[in-house]
Image (spheres, rainbow, N blue to C red):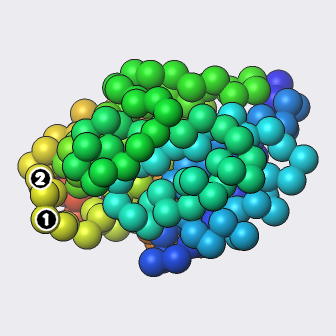
Amino acid sequence: MSKLQIVRIAGDREVNGYVISCARSGEAVVIDPVEPVDKVLPQLEGKQLAWIVATHGHPGHLAGKDQLQAACGGVTAMHVADAKNYLRSAERYLVDQDVLPFGDFELHVLHTPGHTSGSLCFQVANHIFTGDTLLAGGLGKQTPGADLRRQLYSILRAVAPLPPATAIYPGHGPVTSLERELAQSPVFRGLGQG
């Protein structure tokens, strides 16, 4: 069985970017291409970049997209709602339940509107990349255009039902687990899950 490799990159504005790759094939995905891109590029040495995806359209979460693609290739992808709202572009617009293959793995797309109307989470094996939909101990900063009710519903529908051992990789702050968040986060207490 092939091994999944995950590297967290601390970008500008305290945004987490991630490089995930298949150890066997060397195919990789960048989730939230942060700046400076010079922090991302060393993690892609010897790998083939298949996808560059954004959890949402806020600037820090895709600031390095064009520069990264120019250096490494890869198909850029995000939800069309955030592309329109934030005047962003991508080569592919993702919808709920899309599947993006890379090596021996598949990245499953979960549309989780609320933080932005086009917010996405990405799941591979027992790992979920939540952007600002869900952070360790809370939610991403509520900005104009955010819909808290919709965000909480998205968490309840897409994240809460996952196995408790699922690792959560947020857009800001430390990596956590669903088990820990169910037990400790006020988000899940508010949803009657904790």
Q: Are marks 2 and 1 in contact (CB under 8 Å)?
A: no
Query: Residue 80, percent across and down?
Result: 31, 35
The residue at the point 76 percent across, 60 percent down is 41
Which residue lies at the image location 50% right of the left edge and 33% below the top edge? Answer: 91
Task: Decide if residue 25 is on the left or right side of residue 12.
Answer: right
Local crowd size for mark 1, using a 10 Å CA cut-off: few (<14), some (14–19), many (≥20): few
Residue at image point 81% right, 62% down? 42
Q: Residue at x 71, y 41 (%)?
A: 73
Amino acid type at image mark 2: Asp
In the image, 44: left or right of 68? right
The one of 178 and 121 positioned closer to us in this rendering: 121
| Residue 2 visible | yes
Q: Nearer the viewer, mark 2 or mark 1?
A: 1
185 displayed left or right of 76: left
User: Is 183 left or right of 53, judged from the image as shown?
Assistant: left
Q: Which sits in the foreground, 104 or 184?
A: 104
Q: Quadrant of residue 59?
A: bottom left
The amino acid pointed to by label 1 is Pro
Name the residue tied to disc 1.
144
Cα–Cα span, label 2 and label 1: 9 Å
Residue 22 screen position, x and y as percent: 78, 36
166 relative to 174, above or below: above
Residue 130 position within the rendered picture, expressed as x and y whole percent measured from the top left:
42, 50
Label 1: which secondary element? loop
Residue bearing mark 2 = 147
